Image: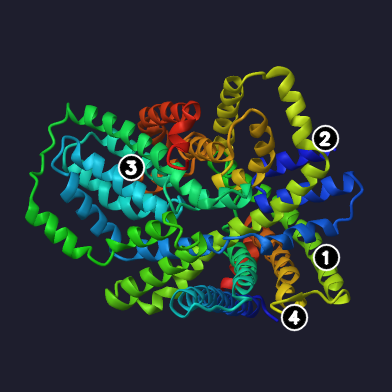
């Protein structure tokens, strides 16, 4: 595959990922608002309520946190102590960013492994949520999210590596 | 252990994402006391058990939605109609609108971008000195931090496991004190400049009210339902989202449906970044408690620090330094669990500690070298960063005085709570 095709493929992947993230964020946030709001209406108007509504909202917060964090990694918007970018040269900052982003990728990967082990324990011990449903489908988003975080930081590091050293590659892919 | 800690500090200063630093410190910690790393996962998943956490995404989204509509312009017009006739009127308008707006958008820099763009040129037009305007707008960007329903207040309540309603009440007077002290400075400065006073006009006030008729009930809905105990904070937040959505998207149609995915994404990026740090800090906090760090900290302190006064002085110095390097959200989730037991032993209540913490951290938004407001203002108004530093300095001094007052005058925070 030529580099131009590869670049086009990555652009398509990026677009698809972005749409997937946005769709999930809208669905989860919308679902949370709907459940929380209906619960108030049910209680205040009909003096009734759904027992597991609060728990569902809290599970959705977890989903929102994970999907939001993955999306934040795509847009490189995670919270950092942003001291050096105002002090050092662009090139040096990029070089440092490669190191710290690889570090973030490694850490996210390790957390993903242990979250996966946690899910396995949940399956083994048959943990439940929402009045008797198995817990793991509600929680499996966490290890998946951290795998994606790890992947995203790896990509961020590679991108910066290309910007730093591979101006040739960028020129070729442009032609 | 010390080698690893220094390495992590170095990585953090070099710009590694803070969530990774926190996760790594938790993992190294658990390994050092021979605990299984699955503890990191267990603690992270405990995020799901935290009450009222949904208030954070709800209020953030509502705030972003408001800032995308024309509500900021209407808010300025409204406040101008009420306060504009006073000496230093427009400067006061700036303080009040920014405080109000920041409370609703969670002090994430949106205020400077949304309101600064309107107020900065308006201040110049009214003849205020440029340096003053720059400092004023930069300072105002984080002014509403102590007012309900600001995100840092909610996050502190979640982390410290203290009533968020009480925090909302506690922040009110200290927040007003800050505005009052800054207002006096603004009136003092405007005494020299020859800005045109806008005469008071009932007709303009009525027009402004008519224009903002849909938004005026909002603070009453939110604050009223929380203060009266009618709704929990997270429920009030859900009502706020529904209300703001209906008004701005369905009735006024200032935000188009096609813009919603972008606004949801923008706001949830911030939420995701904050909650990721929160979840992982549960793990690092769990380690520090297992390892007995709060006790060690207290034992070290108690031999040196004997009175509450000395403790508060040290606390303020520590928070100012912390605020200068760490953002307010990370600072809350990382430092508050360590401070709580220590503060309790010096007889500083959890509520008062929260107000001191946030008030001091607010200064961090405008302390060099990494104050967020400084960079946003420098970028937004195309001014060199050094110029923003010096323009903000007098405001910083005034706010510092207010923080000292807040720290040593506990009843100011606790009066409305009791």
Q: Residues within 10 Å of mark 3 (few under 14, many from 20)?
A: many
Q: Residues within 10 Å of mark 2 (few under 14, many from 20)?
A: few
Q: Residue at point 69% right, 77% down? A: A130
Residue B209 at what x, y percent from top left? 18, 60
Which residue in the structure is indicated by mark 4?
A132
* Mark 1 or mark 4, earlier in chain: 1
Question: What chain is tagged by disc 1?
Answer: A
Query: At 42% from the left edge and 64% from the top edge, which residue is drawn?
Result: B62
Say which element carries label 3.
helix
Q: Chain of mark 3?
A: B
Query: What's the CA distance linking mark 2 and mark 3?
Result: 42 Å
Q: Is residue A16 above or below residue B340?
A: below
Residue A99 is labelled as none
Res B63 → quadrant: bottom left
Question: Do circles 4 and 3 both sit on a common chain?
Answer: no
Q: Secondary structure at mark 1?
A: helix
- The residue pinned by badge 1 equals A113
- Is B202 left, or right, of B43 in this rendering? left
- Looking at this view, is B188 or B232 the one in front? B232
User: Which mark is nearer the camera, 4 or 3?
Assistant: 4
Q: Identify residue for label 3.
A: B137
**Whether residue B344 is visible:** yes
Q: Which residue is mark 2?
A: B2
**Percent x, y for residue B409?**
46, 28
- Mark 1 is surrounded, within 10 Å at the Cα level, by few (under 14), some (14 to 19) or many (20 or more) other residues, namely some
């Amino acid at each position: 595959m030529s580099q131009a095709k590869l670049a086009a493929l990555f652009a398509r992947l990026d677009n698809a990922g972005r749409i997937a993230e946005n769709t999930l964020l809208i669905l989860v946030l919308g679902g949370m608002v709907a459940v929380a709001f209906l619960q108030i209406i049910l209680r205040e108007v009909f003096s009734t309520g759904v027992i597991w509504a609060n728990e569902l909202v809290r599970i959705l917060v977890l989903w929102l946190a994970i999907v939001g964090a993955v999306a934040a990694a795509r847009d490189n918007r995670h919270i950092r102590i942003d001291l050096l970018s105002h002090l050092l040269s662009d090139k040096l900052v990029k070089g440092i960013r490669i190191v710290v982003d690889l570090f973030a990728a490694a850490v996210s990967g390790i957390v993903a492994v242990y979250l996966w082990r946690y899910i396995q324990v949940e399956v083994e011990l048959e943990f439940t949520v929402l009045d008797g449903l198995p817990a793991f489908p509600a929680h499996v988003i966490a290890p998946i999210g951290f795998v994606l975080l790890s992947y995203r930081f790896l990509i961020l590091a590679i991108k910066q590596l290309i910007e730093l050293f591979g101006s040739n590659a960028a020129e070729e892919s442009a032609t | 252990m010390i080698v690893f800690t220094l390495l992590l500090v170095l990585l953090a200063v070099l710009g590694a994402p803070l969530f990774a630093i926190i996760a790594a410190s938790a993992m190294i910690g658990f390994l050092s006391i021979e605990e299984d790393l699955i503890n990191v996962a267990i603690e992270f998943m405990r995020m799901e058990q935290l009450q009222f956490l949904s208030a954070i995404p709800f209020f953030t989204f509502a705030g972003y939605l408001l800032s995308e509509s024309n509500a900021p312009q209407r808010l300025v017009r409204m406040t101008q109609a009420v306060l504009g006739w006073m000496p230093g009127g427009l400067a006061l308008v700036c303080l009040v609108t920014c405080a109000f707006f920041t409370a609703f958008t969670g002090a994430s820099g949106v205020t400077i971008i949304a309101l600064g763009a309107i107020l900065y040129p308006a201040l110049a037009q009214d003849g205020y000195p440029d340096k003053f305007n720059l400092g004023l707008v930069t300072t105002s960007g984080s002014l509403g931090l102590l007012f309900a329903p600001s995100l840092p207040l909610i996050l502190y309540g979640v982390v410290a496991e203290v009533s968020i309603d009480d925090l909302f009440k506690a922040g009110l007077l200290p927040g007003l004190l800050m505005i009052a002290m800054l207002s006096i400075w603004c009136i003092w400065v405007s005494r020299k400049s020859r800005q045109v006073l806008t005469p008071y006009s009932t007709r303009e006030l009525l027009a402004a009210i008519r224009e903002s008729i849909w938004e005026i009930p909002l603070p009453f809905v939110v604050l009223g339902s929380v203060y009266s105990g009618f709704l929990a904070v997270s429920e009030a937040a859900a009502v706020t989202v529904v209300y703001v959505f209906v008004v701005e998207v369905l009735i006024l149609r200032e935000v188009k449906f096609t813009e919603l995915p972008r606004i949801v994404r923008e706001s949830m990026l911030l939420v995701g970044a904050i909650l990721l740090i929160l979840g992982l800090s549960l793990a690092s906090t769990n380690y520090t408690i297992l390892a007995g760090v709060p006790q060690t900290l207290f034992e070290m302190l108690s031999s040196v620090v004997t009175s509450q006064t000395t403790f508060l002085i040290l606390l303020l110095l520590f928070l100012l330094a912390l605020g200068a390097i760490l953002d307010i959200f990370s600072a809350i989730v990382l430092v508050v669990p360590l401070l709580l037991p220590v503060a309790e032993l010096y007889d500083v209540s959890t509520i008062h500690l929260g107000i001191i913490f946030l008030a001091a951290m607010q200064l961090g938004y405008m302390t060099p070298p990494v104050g967020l407001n400084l960079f946003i203002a420098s970028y937004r108004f195309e001014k060199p960063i050094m110029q923003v530093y010096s323009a903000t300095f007098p405001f910083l001094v005034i706010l510092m005085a207010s923080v000292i007052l807040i720290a040593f005058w506990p009843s100011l925070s606790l009066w409305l709570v009791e």
